[in-house]
Image: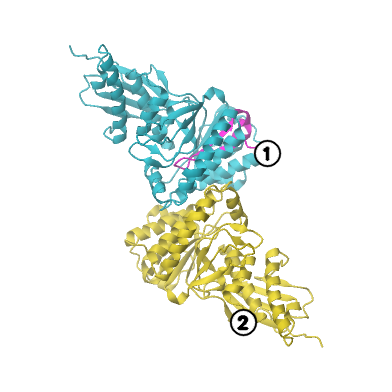
Chain colours: A cyan, B yellow
Amino acid sequence: MADAKVYRASTTAPVNIAVVKYWGKRDAKLNLPTNSSLSVTLSQADLRTLTTASCSSTFTQGDSLTLNGESSDVSGARTQACFRELRARRAALEAADSSLPKLSTMPLKIVSENNFPTAAGLASSAAGFAALVQAIANLYELPDSPSQLSLIARQGSGSACRSLFGGYVAWRAGDKQDGSDSMADLVAPASHWPNMRALILVVSAAKKGVSSTAGMQQTVATSGLFQQRIGTVVAANMAAMEKAVKQKDFATFAEVTMRESNSFHACCADTYPPIFYMNDVSKAAIRAVEAINAQAGKTVAAYTFDAGPNCVVYYLEEDASAVLGAFSTVLAGVSGWNQASAGSAPSIKLDEGIAGILKDGVSRVIMTGVGEGPMKTDEYLVAEDGQPIAR
Amino acid sequence: MADAKVYRASTTAPVNIAVVKYWGKRDAKLNLPTNSSLSVTLSQADLRTLTTASCSSTFTQGDSLTLNGESSDVSGARTQACFRELRARRAALEAADSSLPKLSTMPLKIVSENNFPTAAGLASSAAGFAALVQAIANLYELPDSPSQLSLIARQGSGSACRSLFGGYVAWRAGDKQDGSDSMADLVAPASHWPNMRALILVVSAAKKGVSSTAGMQQTVATSGLFQQRIGTVVAANMAAMEKAVKQKDFATFAEVTMRESNSFHACCADTYPPIFYMNDVSKAAIRAVEAINAQAGKTVAAYTFDAGPNCVVYYLEEDASAVLGAFSTVLAGVSGWNQASAGSAPSIKLDEGIAGILKDGVSRVIMTGVGEGPMKTDEYLVAEDGQPIAR
């Protein structure tokens, strides 16, 4: 008798923003990085991917993936690698226990949605691949730990491996050729340093820049400074950052975060031809953070930029008034501020030049903070009958 | 009987634009660099400083310096170092030949003028100190070679040592503690590769950035990537550049020029806090040069940026139509184009985004080319009676 049941499992997964940056692959196929990295997982209340993985022998179209309502190609090597690895693990369980339904042989139907606009230009592939891997792992009832799953998610998108944990997460580069030691681990849970906050300044870019996959390989191939970064700079920053997180030392956390962002973008600028992700608005955000720290008389804010012009400002809850006050005065007209920020009195004032550039260039803000890793949910994007659920 | 005569000598001196960049001092007092550099001397028909050095026992106000009609402080260590070194050499001549007038004991009156607007933001200190040193050397009738004089000019402004030669000029970093081997020499005269041209896109900056003297020391002190630049990158670029100049190999000259500019600005971006000299207009100029080379099907243009947003585009006379055509179509409204460029048919078209940014951000252009070193002239800025000449 054929099994016509639709099996389902759902998870949410978070975005993470690196404070020690991943830039450069030593193996492009396996997504093995040239260096370790470290990130802060952001709260899923503000930024998360919700993914339902389902499978059924009645799915006759083969594996499929729907992202934000649009059908997405699953034939790419990265998605295929994730499917293959997860199926192999399920198949091993099935081989060991013949009573288990043969989910590994059924077509997968994956439906995924972000709770934030794609237009925001936030790297969603980390949350996306983390959610995809976790949802299928839930569906398959795999016993694998987050670190073990991170080995799979890494093959989908390098930084995705860090989104399998909440809090403060390291991705160890590893040195094995097969990548079996290139995985994420928990440096500290969100509860260890729960008052870490992030303000994202969404900067409208005239044009999408070089993709990070293409860009990082150009850097590896052409930058004369990059070897120094991966050989010396990052190791020191990883050590300093882990210690800062463990000791909840914001001043060091902030300095390393800013130096790391600078170092990464310097290597982009040293690429031939040069890659520029930051624009004049991004640079005004840097000057604003410097001005806030100078006027506060201590380090209360840190900027970091990924492969785009958006600025992520890390700060502590207790300094919210200083940090948010400075930005919300200038950016009162954009969406994303909540009541807490609107009420704060701005004791810190940005100079008019910086304020003008930010006002013209920042299209919205996102207020968030450190958060948890993937969470199983009974919210489904595929109905019991296997049909996608319209939302 | 007192000697009441006013002794005078005049010289012009050129601007130079480095293709292997000077950035970083290993000795701030002696202006000893962390690395060798190489520059192209630009034609004095377009950019030059004219300086008259005069001395007389009747000058009772002590040493004085007038720059572009304004009195300038001579008490700074750099100017004092130049005066001291030149006087010492003159004093040695006077000691050896008692018939010589005792110019070394007389107050100096130096008057200097640039033939280009200071507002253009072109580094004029190189031409200025080269002219000052050469004018006094002429006044004192010193037998010193340009390389020997470059030792003195270097103490006024590092890059000034390269403006004592025309053509293609290297500044050897040297390794002696007293700086006695840190001097300029001629890689090739202008006549060796006379068809080298330069188009300067003058970009209006909202605000003057960090001074290069302060900036380079911040880089030395804080950049984690800088050691790689001075230890490895520059040596390779110096060797490649000297060979390219000697072989008149424009493709290599251009690639090394662009990579060097990228490397220098990358180290600025890696400084803590980061230094940004290029803005979005500068980056549009880079994209324009890349588009020109792509559409030409070979390397016909090279960009380079000093400590400011202005773009210097090197190209060869035979490619003027392609390079100037592309820029002059977009920048038809700004001053600085000559007839040769206006007549060229634009076969290369820049995309609208780049064109729009350049049109908004480039305030003028300067068309020039490789040129000669300092030239003695009988044009004086101090009259025979010792009075400054109004012009």
Name the secondary structure under disc 1: loop
User: Can see residue A5?
Assistant: yes
Q: Label 2, label 1: how many angstroms apart (C-alpha)?
A: 56 Å
Name the secondary structure under disc 2: loop
In the image, residue B327 sits, relative to residue A188, either above or below, namely: below
Quarter of the figure with the C terminus of chain A: top left
* Residue visible at 24% across and 23% down in the picture: A107
Q: What span is in magenta?
A: A295-324
Say which residue label 1 marks. Answer: A297
Say which residue label 2 marks. Answer: B379
* Residue visible at 38% across and 26% down in the picture: A149
- Could you tell me which chain the residue with mark 2 belongs to? B
Seen as rendered, the residue at the extreme left is A1
Q: Position of residue B212 (x, y in %)?
A: 59, 57
User: Can see residue A349?
Assistant: no
Seen as rendered, the residue at the extreme right is B1
Q: Are tags 2 and 1 found on a single chain?
A: no
Q: Position of residue A84 (x, y in %)?
A: 28, 28
For residue B286, which quarter of the picture?
A: bottom left
In the image, residue B145 sits, relative to residue A98, either above or below, namely: below
Amino acid type, residue under disc 2 in the picture: Glu
Q: Position of residue A352 (x, y in %)?
A: 61, 46
Q: Position of residue B194 (x, y in %)?
A: 43, 75
> Label 1 crowding class (10 Å Cα cut-off): few <14, some 14-19, many 20+?
few
For residue B377, which quarter of the picture?
A: bottom right
> Label 2 crowding class (10 Å Cα cut-off): few <14, some 14-19, many 20+?
some
Amino acid type, residue under disc 1 in the picture: Gly
